[in-house]
Amino acid sequence: MPDLADRLGLESVTFVKNADSLPADTTVLFSWLYGKGSIDISNTPNLVWIHQAGAGVDAVLTPSIIASEVMMTNSAGVFDDAIAEFVLGMVLALTKGFPRSFKQQQEHEWKHFLNGRIGGKRALVIGAGSIGRSIRTLLIAANMRTEMVGRTSRQDPSIGKVHGSADIPNLLSATDVVVLATPLTPETNGLVDEAFLDAMPSSAYLINIGRGKIVDTSALVNALHAGSIAGAAIDVVDPEPLPADHPIWDAPGLMLTPHHAGDYPEHRSDLIDLFVNNFGRYTSGSSLVNSIDKKAGY
């Protein structure tokens, strides 16, 4: 980011490798912290604003930051379309049996099998933020009946009915695909446990592009081996990075990717553009976009 100072209209920008050693005079922090380490604000009395170069802020929301007056924003919007495309791709891959086809190709095995349809099937998207909404748009375009779940039940002017999280147990039994697009909060930590997976039809699929800790990894491994669900596609997992000897690698019916659902060639440039635009709002005294409710976690 050699030209960042020029773009911000500043004489210089200080780059630090570790967020626990911030300069004492730091006023604005542009954080690229993803799950490792934490931000120590104890020696930065002038810190006013932290902008996170990502949609999730769970990695940086320490108790001290939550309790402080420091504003926080995220990069919501940058990854929406890319992640929605990823989810649609995974829905198709699982339903059409692409992993099985690729395996048969590698083994030079010509063996016919039936594959499924997604048209008319029911999808439940848990998470009604911008990513969840983009996912909904593509799934509806693919002729899937799609319902949304947010923190509370409400009528949304742009997407209609949004179910509350309390409704999830009653929705699972009639769902063909469950997509996790919710932030990691105390309420969603461990949301998908044994009971959740048992409530899904054995023909249903689980897709997680939210955070790994939303899913009980051991429960998912057991469900896949038991055939409690038909399969899963997870781009995030607990723990990350995933150890090479973890049992989930070999779970049947699983498609596993290394937390890159939203990453595309220009995404870093787009993240910087968003911060630069928000910095302009900050210096002009305008309200910031993508403000985070630190207590809620999103």
Image: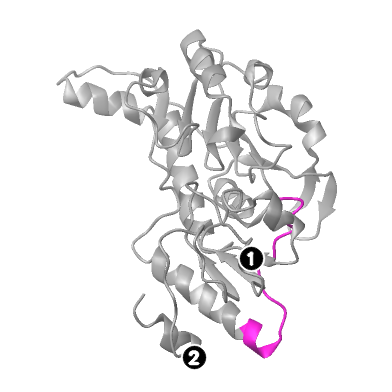
Question: Considering the image in quadrants, where does the C terminus appear?
Answer: bottom right
Under mark 2, the amino acid is: Gly
Magenta region: which residues? Answer: 281-298
Q: Secondary structure at mark 1?
A: strand
The vertical placement of 174 against 276, above or below, is above
Residue 171 left/right relative to 211: right
Pick whichever, 99 or 131, lies toward us: 131
Quadrant in which the N terminus is drawn? bottom left
For residue 90, above or below residue 68:
above
x then y, percent, for residue 76: 59, 61
Q: Point out residue 267 in the picture as x, y percentages from the top left corner.
A: 41, 64
**Spot occupied by residue 192 in the image (x, y as percentages of width and height):** 63, 27
Per the image, the residue denoted by label 2 is 9
Q: Please identify the quarter of the rendering in which residue 216 is found.
A: top right
**Quarter-of-image position of residue 67:** bottom right
**Residue 73: mark:** 1
> Which residue corresponds to the image point at 70% horizontal and 49% vertical from the top-left?
63
Question: What amino acid is found at the position of numbered circle 1 in the picture?
Answer: Thr
Does residue 63 appear in the picture of this structure?
yes
Residue reaching furthest top?
226
